[in-house]
Image (cartoon, grey):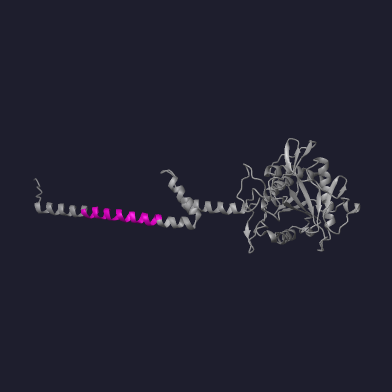
């Protein structure tokens, strides 16, 4: 028996109508969602642009998404966290900087405090010929002890030989380096260009006194000394810089007992490029240095000023023996310069405005070699 299927023409027409309607609906939905997607893309871009402004890490992620290949898989959250942690790490490495209510950017370089690792350095050679380069500022002094020249600028202190004998009793192991006039800087060079914040002044820590202190810290740590390098900017208001450094250094000394040696590192205040006190050591040029010692000559209490002077004489004696001309005459003044805080405190002026950073960094190499002989 043969079964025949009879197809009604009306049914065929119905099926065609249904299919046409379905196709029309699909096309309509496709067009609708296509325009909706465009709208979503616009909103998304606007939203991301807003996030770019508020959260720097999002901007980094967006840029990386734009420039990545089509096959790369981007993990936005992980990437954003990586950028933010990198920023936090950068802040930490810059000396844990804070800004106090009086506008002082402050911090202690933790990498230089208590670290057992030392950067590999090339020690200064000894036995080299030295020669002071002639400059336009004559050398002046009033007293001399065993080759160490001293310019006594106080009104009432009369120096006796007993006051100059460099017998000192200080803890030589711990050293605190800081910078009351942090922003003092030098004549710019190709490697040390900076944005000036005044006459031979900059807040760029790679081009002001902090850079000089960092170099000295590096060498002293190499020689085995415990060094705290205070990178605080104390001279955002120049007239109050010593008041600010007094508070900052006193706090550091409270936290770091048995620290007798304080080096407040400056450069000479002469504010033009014509003065560049320089000594040639071997084949290198180094900026000349100078101790400035405070006293109680101005009437302020400062019982240990003579010990500070004796330590400066002791160091300069050794410097004259190893590298004659590295130091200019010591200056003794009435002002205290916060040196009442310790019995081994001093200002050390490194070069002047006419010197370059390269010359001052060279000075730190030779100065640290001198200290390694004295402090041991």
Q: Is residue 376 visible?
A: no
Q: Residue at x 56, y 53 (%)?
A: 87
**Between 54 and 243, which is closer to the camera in this rendering?**
243
Residue 185 in the figure: left or right of residue 159: left
Residue 224 rendering spot, x and y as whole percentages? 75, 46
Q: Residue at x 40, y 56 (%)?
A: 46
Q: Could you tell whether 140 is left or right of 59 in the image?
A: right
Along the viewing direction, whichever of 238 and 270 lies nearer the viewer: 270
Q: In which quarter of the view is residue 354 placed? A: top right
Residue 263 horizontal/vertical position (percent):
75, 52
Q: Is residue 225 left or right of residue 102?
A: right
Residue 69 vertical position relative to residue 34 in the rendered view, above or below = above
- Whether residue 293 is in magenta: the answer is no
What span is in magenta?
24-45
13 above or below 358? below
Quarter of the image that includes the N terminus: top left
> Could you say which is closer to the camera, residue 57 or residue 274?
274
Q: Position of residue 65 (x, y in %)?
A: 44, 48
Would you say residue 147 is visible in this rendering?
yes
Which residue shows up at 68% across the image and 51% down it? 184
Question: Of residues 344 and 220, which is closer to you in this image?
Answer: 344
Q: Position of residue 231 (x, y in %)?
A: 67, 54
Is residue 37 on the magenta stretch?
A: yes
């Amino acid at each position: 028996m043969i079964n025949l299927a009879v197809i009604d023409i009306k049914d065929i027409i119905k099926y065609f109508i249904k299919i046409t309607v379905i196709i029309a609906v699909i096309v309509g939905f496709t067009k609708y969602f296509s325009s909706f997607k465009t709208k979503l893309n616009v909103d998304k871009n606007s939203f991301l642009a807003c996030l770019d402004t508020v959260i720097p890490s999002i901007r980094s992620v967006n840029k990386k998404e734009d420039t990545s290949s089509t096959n790369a898989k981007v993990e936005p959250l992980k990437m954003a966290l990586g950028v933010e942690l990198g920023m936090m790490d950068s802040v930490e490495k810059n000396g844990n900087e804070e800004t106090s209510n009086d506008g002082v950017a402050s911090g202690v370089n933790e990498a230089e405090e208590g670290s057992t690792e030392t950067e590999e350095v090339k020690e200064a050679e000894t036995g080299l010929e030295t020669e002071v380069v002639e400059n336009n500022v004559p050398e002046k002094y009033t007293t001399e002890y065993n080759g160490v020249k001293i310019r006594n600028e106080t009104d009432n202190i009369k120096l006796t030989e007993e006051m100059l004998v460099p017998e000192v009793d200080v803890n030589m192991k711990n050293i605190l380096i800081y910078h009351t006039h942090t922003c003092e800087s030098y004549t710019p060079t190709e490697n040390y260009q900076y944005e000036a914040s005044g006459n031979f002044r900059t807040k760029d820590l790679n081009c002001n006194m902090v850079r000089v202190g960092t170099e000295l810290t590096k060498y002293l740590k190499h020689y085995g000394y415990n060094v705290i390098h205070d990178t605080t900017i104390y001279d955002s208001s120049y007239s109050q810089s010593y008041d600010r450094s007094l508070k900052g250094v006193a706090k550091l000394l409270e936290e770091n007992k048995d620290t007798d040696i304080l080096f407040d590192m400056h450069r000479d205040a002469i504010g033009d490029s014509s003065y560049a006190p320089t000594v040639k050591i071997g084949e290198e040029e180094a900026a000349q240095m100078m101790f400035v010692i405070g006293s109680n000559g101005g009437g302020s209490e400062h019982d240990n000023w003579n010990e500070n002077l004796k330590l400066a004489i002791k160091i300069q004696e050794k410097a004259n023996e190893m590298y004659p001309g590295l130091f200019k005459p010591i200056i003794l003044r009435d002002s205290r310069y916060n040196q009442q805080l310790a019995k081994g405190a001093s200002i050390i002026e490194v070069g002047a405005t006419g010197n370059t950073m390269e010359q001052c960094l060279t000075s730190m190499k030779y100065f640290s070699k001198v200290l390694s002989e004295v402090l041991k």
